[in-house]
Amino acid sequence: MQCGGRRRLDAGRDPQNHTAMRQPADFDQMEASLLYCPKCRQATPVRKRLLLVLPEGEKFDYVCAQCGTISGDKLERPPPRRW
């Protein structure tokens, strides 16, 4: 269908059927590949290092691949249990 010279993206969809419009999750968690390093004073590649295993999840440090300085951290929570 054309609408003002542009093709409508929702052409052929039932507006009452909301499940057809839902998209599956493209990702579960994001991973950093570059972070700002305060020592190098620029964005550098990082390595993910396990720091702690906690009841609420695993804590990771992101370490600069060039100088070894900690550039960030992340707490990964386990997926919810399905009974």
Image (cartoon, rainbow, N blue to C red):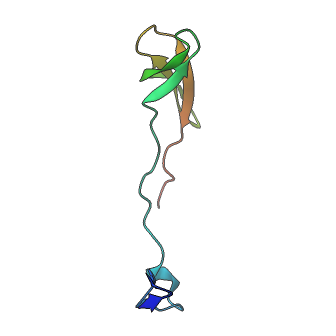
**Residue beneath the point at 42% across and 88% down:** 11
- Can you say whether 64 is above or below 82 in the image? above
Instruction: Say whether residue 51 is visible.
Output: no
In depth, the one of 56 and 9 nearer the eye is 9
Percent coordinates x, y for residue 50 in the rendering: 46, 23
Front residue of this view, candidates 17 and 59? 17
Looking at the image, the residue that sits furthest to the front is 5
Q: Is residue 30 visible?
A: yes
Quadrant of the snapshot with the N terminus? bottom left
Q: Is residue 16 left or right of residue 65?
A: right
Is 59 above or below relative to 76?
A: above
* Residue in view at x 58 percent, y 34 percent: 55
Q: Position of residue 7 (x, y in %)?
A: 42, 83
Q: Quadrant of residue 47?
A: top left
**At which x and y percent is residue 38?**
59, 14
Q: Is residue 43 left or right of residue 26?
A: right
Q: How many marks?
A: 0
Percent x, y of residue 28? 45, 50
Front-most of residues 19 and 2: 2
Residue at 41 percent across and 11 percent down: it is 66
